[in-house]
């Protein structure tokens, strides 16, 4: 595993998986949220994100975590040797996001843009439960495409599966 693409639903554990994989494989992950969000939750431009992602794609080894389909999605998919879809159910995602908000209350978490203090509000809850779930079929098709291209593919559906995957990686 040298080039790893991780995507999935908000609150599913993408960033945690990327961090733990990075520790095991000695690869510094790129967290899309850290370049998407500027201080005080201001969204960055597509150009800014592309400027930050392009040099990472040119590296021999990388972990890129996050969806952001308009930012080199096909390029990431084509260059990746490993594709991981975190397909955790919406209620688990909601619980994990709420728990994360308690852990990082009043602070910015390490995988987030600087100056974006952790929050858990009604808008984010709606995103986790409804709005952010609309592309599941597209995500499954992405995994299918990657599989057909001979890439290592994983669909991880719960914390147990994620932990088992990480245990296998550690061995």
Image (cartoon, rainbow, N blue to C red):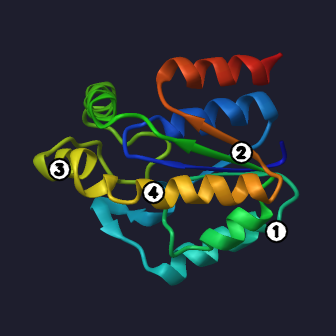
Label annotation for residue 28: 2
**Could you say which is closer to the camera, residue 134 or residue 81?**
134
Residue 14 x %, y %? 51, 40
Q: Residues within 10 Å of mark 1 (few under 14, many from 20)?
A: few
Tell me how far mark 1 sits from mark 4, CA to CA: 29 Å
Label annotation for residue 126: 3
Q: Residue at x 26, y 34 (%)?
A: 94
Query: For the residues carrying marks 4 and 2, which lies nearer the camera in this image?
Result: 4
Q: Compare marks 3 and 2 and give the one earlier in the sequence.
A: 2
Tell me how far mark 3 sits from mark 2, CA to CA: 31 Å
Check disc 3 and report its element: helix, strand or loop: helix
Check disc 1 and report its element: helix, strand or loop: loop
Check contact, mark 1 vs mark 4: CB within 8 A.
no
Query: For the residues carrying marks 4 and 3, which lies nearer the camera in this image?
Result: 4
Residue at image mark 1: 58
Residue 141 x %, y %? 56, 59
Tell me how far mark 4 sits from mark 2, CA to CA: 29 Å
Tell me how far mark 4 sits from mark 3, CA to CA: 19 Å
Q: Compare marks 4 and 3 and give the one earlier in the sequence.
A: 3
Tell me how far mark 1 sits from mark 3, CA to CA: 36 Å
Check contact, mark 1 vs mark 3: CB within 8 A.
no
Q: In the rendered view of the protein, which quadrant contains the N terminus?
A: top right
Please state if 134 lies on the left or on the right of 66 as rendered: left
Check disc 4 and report its element: helix, strand or loop: helix
Query: For the residues carrying marks 1 and 3, which lies nearer the camera in this image?
Result: 3
Q: Compare marks 1 and 4 and give the one earlier in the sequence.
A: 1
Q: In the rendered view of the protein, which quadrant contains the C terminus?
A: top right
Query: For the residues carrying marks 1 and 2, which lies nearer the camera in this image?
Result: 1
Residue at image mark 4: 137
Q: Residues within 10 Å of mark 4 (few under 14, many from 20)?
A: few
């Amino acid at each position: 595993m040298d080039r790893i693409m991780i995507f999935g639903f908000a609150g599913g554990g993408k960033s945690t998986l990327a961090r733990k994989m990075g520790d095991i494989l000695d690869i510094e992950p790129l967290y899309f949220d850290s370049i998407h969000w500027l201080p005080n939750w201001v969204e960055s431009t597509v150009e800014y994100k592309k400027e930050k992602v392009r040099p990472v794609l040119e590296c021999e080894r990388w972990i890129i975590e996050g969806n952001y389909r308009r930012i080199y999605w096909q390029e990431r998919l084509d260059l990746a040797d490993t594709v991981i879809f975190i397909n955790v159910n919406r209620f688990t995602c909601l619980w994990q996001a709420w728990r994360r908000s308690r852990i990082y209350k009043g602070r910015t978490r390490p995988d987030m843009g600087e100056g974006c203090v952790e929050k858990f509000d009604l808008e984010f809850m709606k995103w986790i439960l409804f709005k952010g779930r609309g592309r599941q079929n597209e995500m499954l098709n992405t995994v299918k495409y990657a599989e057909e291209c001979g890439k290592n593919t994983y669909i991880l559906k719960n914390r147990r599966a994620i932990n088992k995957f990480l245990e296998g990686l550690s061995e």
